[in-house]
Image (cartoon, grey):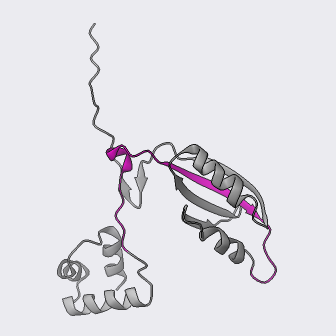
């Protein structure tokens, strides 16, 4: 049923009949599998990916590298749980390399993001350093390509 999960990840709006046909399984089997996946939390939710630039909504997204001192017994999990509880945190990952955690957050302004880092994230016990990177433009997310905005006015060059 891995094919069914891949199809749902690509387009969760597909009707069950279409999903079943594409996965090569009977519709009842696909429906039962989806229900099981939802109940056992293999499927965590369904979400649309919105290109907010197209509706002119001001938003700032930041990727924050976080260095932490792992806790005895719980390692990184306890600090990670404390961080991901904040509403601003959209995604969070344990990393290999020169930092330990990647935190992705969104805010309305640069100041809002800076306040989150300075007032909420950095003071957490065990956090030893942060580096914030602002996302300037999204080209692709979750396998979906963001196409460029249509130009509002064309520039003509006469020679």
Q: Number of numbered discs present?
A: 0
Q: Is residue 60 above or below residue 128?
A: above
The quadrant holding residue 29 is bottom left
Q: Which quadrant is home to the N terminus?
A: bottom left
* Image spot of residue 140 (x, y percent): 41, 52
* Image spot of residue 49 (x, y percent): 36, 60
* Image spot of residue 72 (x, y percent): 82, 80
Whether the magenta-drawn stretch holds residue 38 is answered as: no
Q: Is residue 84 above or below residue 148?
A: below
The quadrant holding residue 121 is bottom right
Q: Which residues are magenta?
A: 46-74
Does 65 sit left or right of 142 as displayed?
Answer: right
Does 119 sit left or right of 112 as displayed?
Answer: right
Residue appearing at x 26%, y 24% in the figure: 154
Residue appearing at x 29%, y 20% in the figure: 155
Q: Is residue 85 above or below residue 117?
A: below
Q: Which quadrant is home to the C terminus?
A: top left
Whether the magenta-drawn stretch holds residue 68 is answered as: yes
* Image spot of residue 77 (x, y percent): 68, 77
Residue appearing at x 44%, y 84% in the figure: 42
In this view, which residue lies farthest toward the top? Answer: 159
Does 142 sit left or right of 78 as displayed?
Answer: left
Residue 28 or residue 1, whichever sits in front: 28
Residue appearing at x 44%, y 44% in the figure: 58
């Amino acid at each position: 049923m891995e094919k069914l999960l891949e199809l749902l990840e690509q387009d969760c709006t597909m009707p069950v009949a279409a999903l079943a046909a594409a996965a090569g399984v009977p519709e009842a089997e696909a429906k039962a599998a989806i229900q099981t996946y939802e109940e056992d939390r293999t499927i965590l939710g369904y979400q649309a990916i919105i290109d907010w630039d197209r509706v002119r909504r001001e938003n700032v997204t930041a990727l924050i590298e976080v260095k932490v001192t792992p806790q005895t017994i719980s390692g990184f999990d306890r600090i990670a749980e404390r961080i991901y509880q904040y509403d601003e945190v959209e995604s969070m990952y344990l990393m290999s390399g020169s930092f330990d955690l990647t935190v992705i957050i969104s805010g309305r302004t640069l100041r809002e993001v800076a306040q989150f880092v300075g007032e909420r994230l950095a003071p957490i016990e065990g956090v030893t350093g942060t580096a914030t990177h602002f996302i300037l433009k999204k080209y692709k997310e979750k396998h979906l390509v963001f196409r460029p905005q249509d130009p509002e006015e064309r520039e003509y060059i006469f020679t």
